[in-house]
Image (spheres, helix red, strand yellow):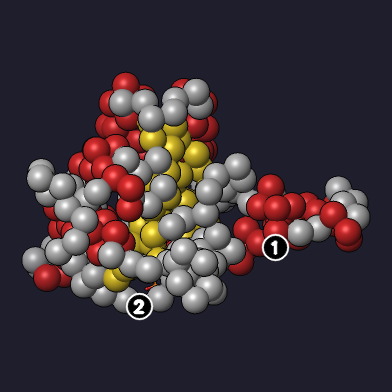
Amino acid sequence: MANLTANGKPELERIPQHVAIIMDGNGRWAQQRGLPRLAGHRAGTNNIRQILEGCVEAGVRYLTIYAFSTENWQRPQQEVFGLMRILEDVIQRELDEMHRQGVCLRHLGWLDGVDESLSRQVVRAVELTRNNTRLFLNVAFNYGGRAEILAAIKAIIREGVSIEDINEVTVNKYLFTHGQPDPDFIIRTGGEQRLSNYLLWQAAYAEIYMTSIYWPDFDKAELFTALQDYARRDRRFGRVNANG
Ligand code: IPE
Ligand code: IPE
Ligand code: MG
């Protein structure tokens, strides 16, 4: 296995700057144990702290996690309500510690249609942590990649940006991730081999890692295994080899 330091962590020079995770498999994790799906969603909040720690230890600067997609509203109302409740609880439980650890939170998505008290918590969390710089944590919540691109197109037209000024840099400025580097590495747990409307614009050259491990079982060791896999990849960006 290449690029490992003595303590089992991947070598820093091959660490992705920005990791994005599709936290999938909570429902199946619960079903496998004869538990209701919501028990899986709850379990899927317990590993977040160690994933943040692992990112900081490895030297990842940006982490984006997919908490709820614009398509997830189509789930049974009871599951949607339960998920919202769990998200509110996780903010209550983790926010102070995240702030102490220097995590800067950003919300990717919309608060329309989201319960008043959860909306307030999201706004408060972003506000509280806005000046932190140790780890940038984006939470994609009520997020969809196509809706994000559409919103960018509309804003560009609304602001009367001239055609000559519309390029990739311009579009980046109108995305929720403005000012941030694109994800280098996308991890999907739960075994599905698709993007499910995640970061469609930003993922253009991301390395993709799919594991059958269900999200509640994805721990720091699994994260380091994924980062080791990333360290071995040859990112060519269309060239013949990575060095041009
Ligand atoms: C991912 O787990 C969490 C959300 C989509 C909110 P799922 O709920 O999709 O779990 P599976 O895919 O049904 O196992
Ligand atoms: C993607 O998972 C969304 C989140 C992890 C929040 P889904 O479980 O909703 O994706 P599909 O429906 O299997 O594509
Ligand atoms: Mg799923």
Does residue 137 sit above or below 30 in this rendering?
A: above
Q: Is residue 125 toward the left or the right of residue 169 in the image?
A: left
Does residue 223 sit above or below 7 in this rendering?
A: below
Residue located 10% across and 43% down the image: 7
x and y, in percent, of residue 144 in the image: 54, 62
For disc 1, the marked residue is 150
Residue located 43% across and 38% down the image: 136
Seen from this angle, which residue lies furthest front? 244
Q: Is residue 244 toward the left or the right of residue 93 in the image?
A: right
Q: Which labelled disc corresponds to residue 193? A: 2
Q: Is residue 99 toward the left or the right of residue 146 in the image?
A: left
Of 137 and 90, the residue lying toward us: 137
- Which amino acid, by three-letter code, is at mark 2? Gln
x and y, in percent, of residue 121 in the image: 45, 32
> Secondary structure under badge 2?
loop
> Secondary structure under badge 1?
helix
Of 242 and 119, the residue lying toward us: 242
